[in-house]
Image: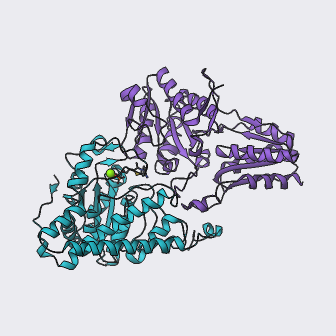
Chain colours: A purple, B cyan
Amino acid sequence: MRTINMRTALLEALNEEMERDETTLVFGEDVGKFGGINKVTEGLYEKYGNRVFDTPIAEPTIVAAAVGMAITGNARPVPELQFGDFAGIAFDEIFNKMGKWRFMHGGQMEMPITLRLPVGIAGGAGPEHSQSPQALFMHGPGLQIVIPSTPYDAKGLLKTAIRDNNAVLFFEHKLLYDMKGEVPEEEYLIPFGKADIKREGSDVTVIATALQVHTALEAAEELAADGTEVEVVDPRTLAPLDMETILSSVRKTGRVLIVHEESKTGGSGAEIAAQIQEEALFDLAAPIRRIGSPDVPIAQNIYLEQFYRPSKEQIVQAVNELMEY
Amino acid sequence: MAEIYKKETQLKDYSKDVLLDFYRTMVKIRKFDEHLIRLMQEGKVSGFYHSGIGSEGLSAGSIRNVLRDEDYIYYNHRGCNQKIAKGVPLSKIYGDFLGTTEGTTRGLGAGIVHSADPSRGVLGQAGTIGSQLGIGIGTAYASKFKGTDQVTVIYFGDGAASREMLHGSLNWAGLYNLPVIYICENNEYAISCHVSETHAVKEHIADWAYGYGISNCVVDGNDVLLMHEATKEAVERAKRGEGPTFIEAQTFRHRGHFEGDPYDYVDGELLKDWKENKDPIRNFVSRMLLDKIAEKQELKTIDQEVEQEILEAIEKAESAPQPEAGRIYEGLFA
Ligand SMILES: Cc1ncc(C[n+]2csc(CCOP(=O)(O)OP(=O)(O)O)c2C)c(N)n1
Ligand SMILES: [Mg+2]
């Protein structure tokens, strides 16, 4: 099978969906002629003209306008914020409007929005351009949360997101844009709420998202050499969350480690851990462990960055500790 | 609507010291930037850098010889122009880029934003451009509340001016008659977008200030003296208790939005014109030589002194250590 990077996979999904439904609109800062600061929308403006447009620097208006477009049924907006951190600027528009408008008005309208949000620590970008805020939105009803780890998942999930008639927050880890993986030429979709087992194992379940899936796989490789078989589960969507797959893995291994780049307190791992213990406490042989980034703002200093990003060494150590129970 | 700020400036109306101070500051800003880019190319500095080369006159003119240490500024993300003009030690700014303990953040690293020096009225900057428009209003409100004559100057780009926050800020400034000066560094572009593609204005961004009853003007930001005069009037207005001023200062980036930007969305001839005919430093030098304020040699000596000062600052910043890992756990709360 051919291999392409995640940026190309995302661009293919945008292209195919814009082709398929001509009400699909792409907009945001520098997404037109410039092709987006991460070059995910490159070439779309040339191809689709006014269906791709640059907006003023005004994140609340970008999201609010998407809501206003979506609820008419005349448009399927796919806006981009340059950094997922800027969800904070448009918080009301995302949390209260995208997420609640339909329900508040008795379900009379649809909300076919896919808001693309690049996230993650990536080379000294500092406290306001490096965060992973996805868990904030798990707390907000009405929002679906996608966080792919591979080009294959990214493409299939973005296509599903765009076709979906409900609001989607689509988080893209910036360090994954250049990462390559197998993606078939033929069209495919990946449903929401379907976790993917990235590696099978019988001793410990490691639940990881985005870049951390790859770190977990590296750790699993190393642990396997010492005879510990790790199962790596990638939820792919945090809302809806595929507890069925997670629980069946947990029941098999009895040991759980959750790894993400979100800060530890109140990260998505907190919710996942809570749900696991509600359903499977007595299947556990050890307490659930979590690794997240420290609960302090992300320093710009690239030397200090390494102390935020969960490492292979941390995962190996945590798995070994779980194996002592 | 907003008027073009016009005034015949004469070099003889300024002392030689003041003129040479403007010159020295502009050279410092430019050389600081050039050396920082070199450090980036050497792989010593990571993250984004948005060069401030080409707009030195705007910052030197609006800060030197008009703002005091106790006056506040919120700098924008382009270059280190305003921080340098306000007197933040160069070694501390380099320290923030190099991530050493010499930096104002004692090693956290700050890059283009987040350096702070409260002792010189530099209260920091937002990574989300334009957020200073709201924060600066609070700072001006606090000065008024306390009854001081401190002035707050908020710098922001044309792009940041499209943030919703600008309108909330202008409304407060006008409503509470605050001692605040908005300086919109209009270099025509926000990353790849020309201001005409993203702003609904009659003619100028400064036109918006009219609706809020705020004094305003459009000024050639590359003319250091004109910039100085416009700001001085605004500062005096604020100190008299007559409230805010909005200055739109016209300039242009010599380099792309960030280091590495191909900068191919700007017409080559236009860029050449700005570089060759509208360079703030070059034009100021011509005027000084023409009016015989200084000899070529005297200016050259200043250049050499500045170069030396910068090399020493880099040396100091580079020789300081990286912080300990535990640094990230310090300073979240007072
Ligand atoms: C709120 C927010 N939106 C977007 C960005 C990303 N960004 C950084 S600089 C910039 C362009 C700024 O243009 P302008 O204000 O004109 O300043 P210039 O870079 O031209 O000096 C953008 C979009 C940001 N940092 N903050
Ligand atoms: Mg600009």
- Figure quadrant of residue A296: bottom right
Q: Is residue A75 left or right of residue B145?
A: right
Q: Residue furthest front?
A: B297
Q: Can you give x and y, in whole percent of width and height, for residue B306 in the image?
A: 34, 73
Quarter of the image with the C terminus of chain A in it = bottom right
Q: Quadrant of the N terminus of chain A?
A: top right
**Residue A126 visible in the shown view:** yes
**Residue B1 in picture, x, y percent from top left:** 16, 52
Left or right: A4 as drawn, with respect to B235:
right
Foreground residue among B267 and B241: B267
Q: Is residue A136 above or below residue B26?
A: above
Of residues B295 and A69, the one drawn nearer to the viewer in this rendering: B295
Where does residue A67 sit, x and y in percent of width and height?
A: 45, 36
Q: Is residue B179 visible?
A: no
Residue A3 % position (x, y): 62, 30
For the image, the number of numbered tags is: 0
Task: Please state which of residues A107 and B308 is positioned toward the viewer in this rendering.
Answer: B308
Quarter assignment of residue A276: top right
Q: Residue at x 49, y 26 (%)?
A: A15
Q: Is residue A215 left or right of residue B79?
A: right
Relative to A246, is A186 above or below?
Answer: above
Judged left or right of residue A7, residue B196 is left
In this rendering, is residue A102 above or below B291? above
| Residue drawn 44% across the image and 69% down it | B93
User: Which is more toward the observer, B144 or B96?
Assistant: B96
Residue at the (37%, 38%) spot, across then down:
A54
